[in-house]
Image (tube, rainbow, N blue to C red):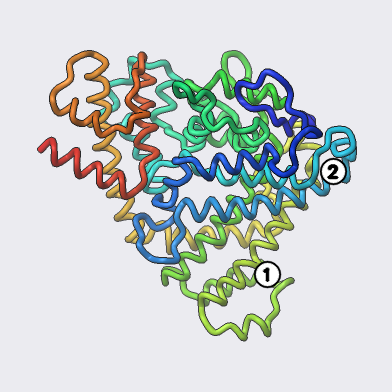
Amino acid sequence: MHWEQLLSLKRQGDTGKRLRSEQDDTRLGFEVDYDRIIFSAAFRSLQDKTQVIPLSKTDFVHTRLTHSLEVSVVGRSIGRLVGKKIIEKYPYLKEVHGFHMNDFGAIVAAACLAHDIGNPPFGHSGEKAIGEYFKTGNGQQYKNQLAEKEWQDLIDFEGNANGFSVLTGNRPGNEGGLRISYATLGAFMKYPKESLPKKPTTAIADKKYGFFQQDKAFFKEVAEELGLISNKTGDNIGFERHPLAYLVEAADDICYTIIDFEDGINLGLVNEDFALEYLIKLVKDSIDVSKYNSLQTKEDRISYLRALAIGSLINDAVRIFIENEENILKGQFPFALTDKSKYKAQMDDIIKLSVKKIYQSREVIEKEITGYHVINNLLDKFITAFNNQYHGKMSNYDVLLLKVLPEKYQVNKDTLYERLLHISHYISLLTDGNAILINKIVSSNNS
């Protein structure tokens, strides 16, 4: 892979080249990506989507929106630090093509901002709830009517693939979705493969999948334009990662490891003594002990340790990337950057404690159970009505129910796969609160 190709400013529908040397530096194309994402309805809905604690009304607990903003800030820092090293190593990128170190930061920041944009309500249990509706619920009835990969898209419903649809999906008069640059789309594509074969290797890029069958043609176009390395044979489509996808992943890994832990401490789910014991191992080289001892509140002490820990992990991620940059360009680095971190043991310890004390806490489990019921019921009712409309046998209830769908979802879908995915996509973009509200409405109307 080659950096000048990987940093493509091309957007869906472009007929000519977009050259970096001709860009207006006051409104750079990669920064336009960020703006388009942040003004999108799908991004806005993240303010009422679960990060760790579902439906929490506590002031300081993170939502998907605050998490995404923080990941974006961390990603921008990592991107700029890497960009500085890359420009120094390959000066022609600046001298011939006009790229700057901040371009790397802008691409990674935009991709980080969007990294959770396709995630359903109620946290990761939302993905599982959609998948299990088809795998073990009433959705099982559709299995024999779908191609194998179409069925896999549904039973392993994936937020990353859904996010690609959000960013690129066509609507009449709105072709190309948000029309994000191919470089940013490449950085966003952490798992550049289709849903089958499932986990064909232990490589990090094969851990999940990154696009639905309906989006396959455009996904392939983006990958080929960027010069990503194909790594699948026959009818299967898959590629090695865009190098900047490693940085997006690292920013997310850093934030959810440290900041979810911070949320758990502030909620009282994790004892402050544990925080000191675990975080001090990450910051022992940079902590100012006198400053730490002068802080009067738990919140301030934990905030100080969190900031230092994130700084340590940023610098380590940059080191690992630069040391392995040539292998990454060859598609020969099958790991997450944090897998090779000198702080991996400490991060693993924090994650284990978070799983025990936070992710498996009674409050989280109870709200995830609520999410399962809500999503299962909404899928069942809307899919039934949408299919009945297609077959011309709607009940009066179906007519009323489909009026609940926002205007942009009131479209015709000719295949069963498209109809099932369309309703799954609609429900996936509901906020936690709106999903519960609509569930109450549709359930009461049917009683």
Can residue 45 be seen at all in this image of the molecule?
yes
Residue at 68 percent of width and 37 percent of height: 29
Q: Residue furthest left?
A: 447
Residue 304 in the image: state x and y as whole percent. 61, 73
Can residue 209 be seen at all in this image of the molecule?
no
Q: Quadrant of residue 187?
A: top right
Q: Secondary structure at mark 1?
A: helix
1 and 2 marks in contact (CB < 8 Å): no
User: Which quadrant of the rendered structure holds the C terminus?
Assistant: top left
What's under tag 1, amino acid-wise?
Answer: Val
Q: Nearer the viewer, residue 45 or 342?
A: 45
Residue at 69 percent of width and 42 percent of height: 27
User: Which quadrant of the rendered structure holds the N terminus?
Assistant: top right
Residue at 43 percent of width and 56 percent of height: 52
Which numbered tag is attached to residue 87? 2
Residue 90 in the image: state x and y as whole percent. 88, 39
Which numbered tag is attached to residue 312? none
Residue 280 in the image: state x and y as whole percent. 63, 72
Q: Secondary structure at mark 2?
A: helix
What's under tag 2, amino acid-wise?
Answer: Ile
> In the image, which is nearer the foreground, mark 1 or mark 2?
2
Residue 75 in the image: state x and y as whole percent. 65, 50
Left or right of 389? Residue 324 is: right
Against 77, residue 100 (above or below) is: above
Name the residue carrying label 1.
Answer: 283
Mark with earlier residue (1, 2): 2
